[in-house]
Amino acid sequence: MIVFSNPTAIANEIPIIHSLFEEGLELLHVRKPEYSAEEMKKFVTAIGLEFRNKLVLHSHHQLAEELGMNRIHFTEKMRTETFNSPARLSKPCRFLKSTSTHSVEEFNALAAEFDYAFLSPVFESISKPNYASKTNLLTAINNRTNFKTQLIALGGIQASNIETTLKAGFDDVALLGTIWNSQNPIQNFKLCQQIALSF
């Protein structure tokens, strides 16, 4: 199971992240779109470099080499720019790579280099009000032809719909709003994790 960081700074985020790792969180996607490179470095360092293999950088990829991290994420725009110009990273093959997609067709067309990709929003977003897909992605994935890349559901994922999502054919789920918009983020994570592991 994957969790995204809150996109903006919030109180107690680092202690909550530590608790999530203690409860068995596999990967944390560090997505802070407004952070400078220096702010991102401070944030990752505050989490602790002992967790570096469980952290995925969404921006300032140059920090991955500096901090000894091995996972980076590409937005749709970054993917287009970078894979047309692979010299952007000095050691591109060293990194495990993920990316974002918003249709099954886009997912199917991904280059083989991507280890996994998010398809979103599967349900109406919790963190972005009124953000929903015009397509029913739960049925659209019947048209999946790419089985080299893991398919991760994102968008509106919570305890009540994880079973439905995994039964539809997604390989895993990612949590954002159900963690950071909750009064009980750790309790919510444990419940979601229990459902996912029992599937």
Image: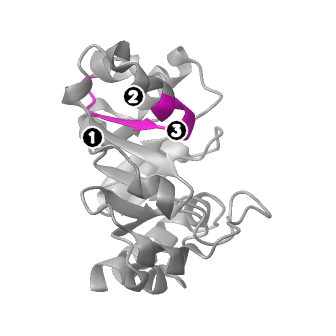
Label 1 or label 2, whichever comes before in sequence order = 2
Q: 194 or 173, which is in the foreground? A: 173
Q: Residue at x 31, y 44 (%)?
A: 114
Residue 77, x across and y down, in percent: 56, 33
Question: Hey, which quadrant is residue 96 in on the image?
Answer: top left
Helix, strand or loop at disc 2? helix
The amino acid type of the residue labelled 3 equals Thr
Q: Residue at x 53, y 82 (%)?
A: 161
What numbered label is drawn on residue 113? 1
Magenta stretch in the rendered image: 68-80
| 139 shown above or below 63 | below
Q: Residue at x 64, y 67 (%)?
A: 183
Report whether residue 22 is seen: yes
Helix, strand or loop at disc 3? loop
The answer for how far apart the CA atoms under marks 2 and 3 are is: 12 Å
The answer for how far apart the CA atoms under marks 1 and 2 are is: 10 Å
Label 2 or label 3, whichever comes before in sequence order = 3
